[in-house]
Amino acid sequence: MTVGEIRALLREDKADPEVITALAEDPRKGVQNLLAAYMRRMERANAEMARVEAMYQYESEQYKKGIRYIAGIDEVGRGPLAGPVTVAAVILKPHWFAEGLNDSKKVTPHHREILAEKIQKEAVAVSIVSLPPEEIDSLNIYDATLTAMYEAVKKLSIPPEAVIVDAMPLHFSVPTLSLVHGDARSASVAAASIVAKVHRDHLMEEYDRTYPEYGFAQNKGYGTAEHIAAIERYGITPIHRKSFDPVRSMLEDGRAHFYIEK
């Protein structure tokens, strides 16, 4: 084979072991360089597969009991001054693999989009619930998050046989594990964190088109200095949480008015 043909062959995810053995004996320097690069790529791929598989530690405990439908639950948007709190519940196929699956905060925005689409297409079940600012103000953010989590589980097309949630104390009639840093330790919770994050980010990008003065596409509703300055200048929009400081105090002392639709 020519070096070009070998390069094309080694672009495959897994080359035939007999071919690899033959290439190892090829004296051409170009072939050896290609083979070395291929082996490094395979090492990285195997390490990534092992990393993701390790995230099934808690799911595997249930798989061994014959339980297959395990819902991972996570939220995004508890801290912002504007926008909804969003919860996703995801049931993955046992030991489902996706390169880069992790806590959404550890995944680049571009790869989050790819993963969210893949999860939506290949998961056993996915549900998303977003509670708007008025409900957050009425309930408080903690209770709003709990409410959204219970609603997300109810909305799943397949009832889960077990639940893993990121740090919140949920109670179901099935085995339920509240796992601190669950989005980095459980594959199901990580998948939920990615789906929730991407969904809420898209909502905030839509709000950015409605209220372009606040930079919602960039700050996602968090209280950046630029965001707070925009509130003082342009006012408090319908998507701001009026129970959250500094919005609440700005209303109380008259430092901010309500947004005037253009």
Image (cartoon, helix red, strand yellow):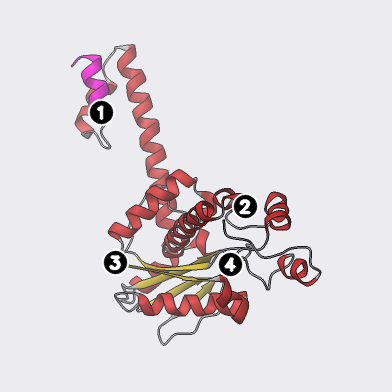
Total number of numbered labels?
4
* Sequence-first disc among 4 and 3: 3
- Mark 1 vs 3, N-terminal side: 1
Tell me which amino acid carries mark 1. Ile
Answer with left or right where residue 59 lies relative to residue 246: left
Q: Which residue is mark 2?
A: 214
Residue range in magenta is 1-11
- Mark 4 or 2 closer to N-term? 2
Q: Which residue is mark 1?
A: 20
Q: CA distance from mark 4 to mark 3?
A: 36 Å
* Residue designated by label 3: 124
Q: In the image shown, does 100 or 3 lie closer to the viewer?
A: 100
Which residue reaches farthest right? 253
Identify the secondary structure beneath mark 4. Answer: loop
Q: Which mark is in front, 2 or 3?
A: 2
Q: Principal SS element in the magenta part?
A: helix
